[in-house]
């Protein structure tokens, strides 16, 4: 009949899922880039002060951290048919960089 055999149950067909995940990481880095550029623009636009420059530089460092995590994950996804799962350490680093970038950009706007 139309059932799944024992041999088919263990086989994995990822389809386009790794491609979609790589594209999602690229979109994440693109949005982080936009946030960092807007933060740098805001830091330099309203008068150059030491705190604004410091927060703008912190935004750039957080963006670089996010970029490194995302690039490592993109390479891992492209390296094999069955990539390793995202480790909690990398997931936490990406989440921390994203949240801290948003907070720093908000501080610049206020």
Image (cartoon, helix red, strand yellow):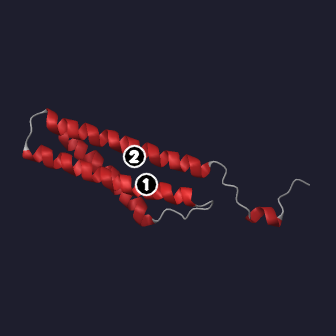
User: Crowding near pointer 2: few (<14 within 10 Å), some, many (20+)?
Assistant: many
Query: Is residue 110 in sight in this rendering?
Result: no
The quadrant of the rendering that contains the C terminus is top left
The residue that appears at 66% across and 54% down in the rendered structure is 14
Give the structural element (helix, strand or loop) at label 2: helix
Residue in front for this viewpoint, 46 or 77: 77
Is residue 24 rendered to the left or right of residue 30? right
Residue that numbered label 1 is attached to? 71
Residue that numbered label 2 is attached to? 29
Residue 16 at x, y = what percent?
63, 48
Q: Earlier in the sequence, mark 2 or mark 1?
A: 2
Residue 31 at x, y = what percent?
38, 41
Residue in front for this viewpoint, 75 or 90: 75
Count how many numbered circles sit on residues in the image.
2
Hey, which residue is sitting farthest right in the picture?
1
Residue 17 at x, y = what percent?
61, 50
Tell which tag, 2 or 1, sits nearer the viewer: 1
The quadrant of the rendering that contains the N terminus is bottom right
Query: Is residue 39 in sight in this rendering?
Result: yes
Measure how far apart labels 2 and 1 are at the Cα level.
9 Å
Give the structural element (helix, strand or loop) at label 1: helix
User: Crowding near pointer 1: few (<14 within 10 Å), some, many (20+)?
Assistant: some
The residue that appears at 79% across and 61% down in the rendered structure is 8
Kindly identify which numbered label has been placed on residue 48. none
Q: Are marks 2 and 1 in contact (CB under 8 Å)?
A: yes
């Amino acid at each position: 009949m139309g059932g799944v055999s024992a041999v088919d149950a263990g086989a994995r067909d990822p389809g386009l899922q790794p491609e979609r995940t790589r594209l999602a990481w690229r979109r994440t880095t693109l949005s982080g880039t936009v946030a960092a550029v807007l933060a740098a623009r805001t830091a330099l636009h309203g008068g150059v002060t030491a705190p604004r420059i410091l927060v703008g530089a912190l935004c750039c460092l957080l963006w670089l951290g996010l970029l490194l995590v995302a690039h490592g994950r993109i390479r891992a996804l492209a390296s094999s048919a069955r990539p390793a799962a995202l480790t909690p350490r990398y997931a936490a680093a990406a989440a921390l960089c994203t949240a801290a970038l948003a907070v720093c950009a908000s501080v610049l706007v206020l």
